[in-house]
Image: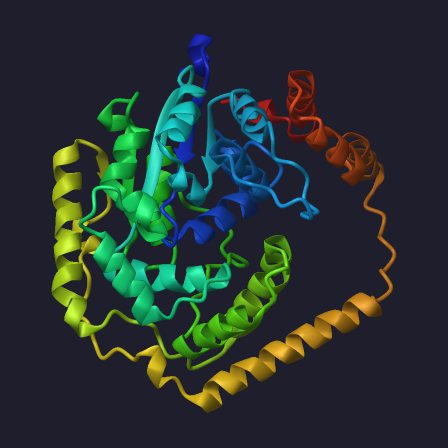
């Protein structure tokens, strides 16, 4: 059962806004909550939207993210308004989760918070030890078309750290200047409505979920973890191959194409699945600096008055081990990664040229057939395209909220 919200008093529900940080188990948590959406709703926590990408699109809207003219995705203008108005229809509580919300600048974060002040708003941030976040963020930069080698990338992060405008100077600090980000999001809220969850180091695989569920005030048991995917790390050689591919890729290949074909297919499905990957680790000469950054964060959180969930020692880096440099990458291993990547792209091209015949759908009864027809009529691909394209108009956004209520029926789990 979710913590008692204010809905019972005739007011808006409680809304949990999970803003990140990236590389702190956010993919795991998002996969889990969407795979167990019905169970969460039974326990009083509704997910607005139809899938996790609706939260990502709303995040892009509130952040004013640019959309390439060639992008085949629908416009995301108006998506934030649609999502929060769906959240406000929750009987008890609603959860919104997108890790890139952390990248909002102060006016954007202010807009997001103000739009939800009529609810019982709570901000959730997940944080991880500094020594693990740095390699993970470099790998992520490579998976979004970056070309800077690990050593040079790390040097730039260290040099930007003492600067007062480091959030503007460095994408890493935009996402992981934790105290500055929390100050920005907590401006209109009491400290006890800001929940900081430390990512557990080791322990059971659902340890992070147990901490997250405690903030939501629900029983963590009974969730299906069988098909939950974490954002698997690349090895040093695999990341180096991808970095070199990024250097060679023509500039006119659009980013949306890269995300759907290079990042998802090669990085996530092929390269991250290779056995025996050499880990990217922090070099020993940065041990003291990393320890100092972690201690500053722990001290700041301790003095903040925020609700800290977990163990502060989770944020302290482990002793640095031997670290390989990208200058020492094995040519043979990089070539091996390139061969696997080429084979995957060739297979994908073949499947697109000669798609397998779709198997006929089996009948699942009259009730399910009626439900499917209703879904197609109200939320089919063409209808979605028309509605999302018109969401700059308030009346269209209102219509989308009504359609969501009809299809998702959040009120059937009233407690």
- Residue 95, position in %: x, y? 46, 33
Specify whether 382 is left or right of 33: right
| Up-down relation of residue 133 to residue 336 (above or below) | above
- Residue 276, position in %: x, y? 42, 82
Q: Image point 62% across, 53% down: which residue?
A: 256
Visible in this render: residue 202?
no
Circle count: 0
Picture quadrant of residue 202:
bottom left
Q: Image point 43% across, 79% down: which residue?
A: 237
The N terminus appears in which quarter of the rendering? top left
Specify whether 147 is left or right of 177: right
Specify whether 68 is left or right of 125: right
- Residue 175, position in %: x, y? 35, 47
Specify whether 188 is left or right of 298: right
Front residue of 308 and 292:
292
- Residue 371, position in %: x, y? 78, 34
| Up-down relation of residue 342 to residue 7 (above or below) | below
Front residue of 261 and 121:
261
Front residue of 76 and 348:
76
Q: Image point 44% across, 70% down: which residue?
A: 234
Instruction: In the displayed orientation, state which residue is furthest to the bottom.
Output: 332
Visible in this render: residue 391?
yes
| Up-down relation of residue 105 to residue 297 (above or below) | above
Picture quadrant of residue 350:
bottom right
Colouring mode (rainbow / by chain / secondary structure / one colour): rainbow
Front residue of 355 and 141:
141
């Amino acid at each position: 059962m979710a913590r008692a919200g204010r809905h019972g008093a005739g007011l808006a529900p409680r809304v949990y806004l999970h803003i990140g940080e990236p590389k702190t188990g956010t993919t795991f948590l998002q996969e889990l909550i969407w795979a167990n959406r019905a169970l969460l709703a039974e326990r009083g926590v509704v997910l607005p939207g139809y899938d996790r990408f609706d939260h990502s699109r709303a995040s892009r809207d509130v952040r004013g993210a640019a959309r390439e003219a060639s992008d085949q995705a629908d416009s995301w203008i108006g998506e934030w308004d649609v999502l929060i108005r769906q959240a406000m229809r929750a009987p008890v509580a609603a959860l919104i989760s997108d890790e890139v919300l952390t990248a909002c600048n102060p006016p954007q974060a202010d807009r997001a918070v103000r739009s939800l002040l009529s609810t019982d708003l709570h901000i959730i941030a997940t944080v991880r030890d500094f020594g693990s976040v740095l390699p993970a963020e470099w790998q992520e930069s490579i998976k979004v078309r970056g070309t800077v080698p690990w050593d040079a990338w790390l040097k730039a992060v260290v040099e930007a750290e003492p600067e007062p405008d480091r959030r503007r100077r460095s994408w890493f600090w935009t996402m992981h200047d934790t105290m500055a980000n929390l100050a920005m999001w907590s401006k209109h809220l009491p400290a006890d409505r800001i929940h900081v969850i430390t990512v557990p180091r080791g322990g059971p695989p659902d340890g992070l979920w147990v901490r997250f569920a405690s903030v939501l005030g629900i029983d963590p048991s009974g969730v299906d973890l069988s098909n939950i995917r974490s954002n698997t790390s690349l090895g040093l050689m695999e990341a180096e191959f991808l970095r070199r591919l990024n250097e060679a890729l023509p500039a006119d290949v659009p980013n949306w194409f890269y995300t759907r074909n290079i990042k998802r297919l090669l990085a996530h499905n092929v390269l991250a699945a290779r056995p025996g990957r050499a880990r990217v680790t922090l070099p020993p000469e940065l041990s003291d600096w990393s320890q100092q950054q972690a201690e500053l964060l722990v001290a700041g959180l301790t003095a903040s008055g925020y609700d800290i969930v977990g163990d502060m020692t989770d944020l302290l880096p482990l002793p640095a081990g031997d670290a390989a440099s990208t200058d020492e990458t094995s040519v043979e291993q990089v070539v091996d990664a390139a061969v696997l990547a080429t084979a995957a792209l060739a297979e994908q091209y073949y499947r697109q040229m000669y798609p397998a015949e779709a198997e006929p759908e089996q009948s699942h009864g009259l009730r399910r057939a009626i439900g499917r027809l209703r879904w197609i009529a109200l939320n089919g691909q063409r209808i979605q395209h028309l509605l999302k394209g018109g969401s700059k108009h308030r009346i269209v956004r209102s219509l989308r909220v009504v359609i969501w209520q009809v299809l998702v029926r959040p009120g059937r789990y009233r407690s």
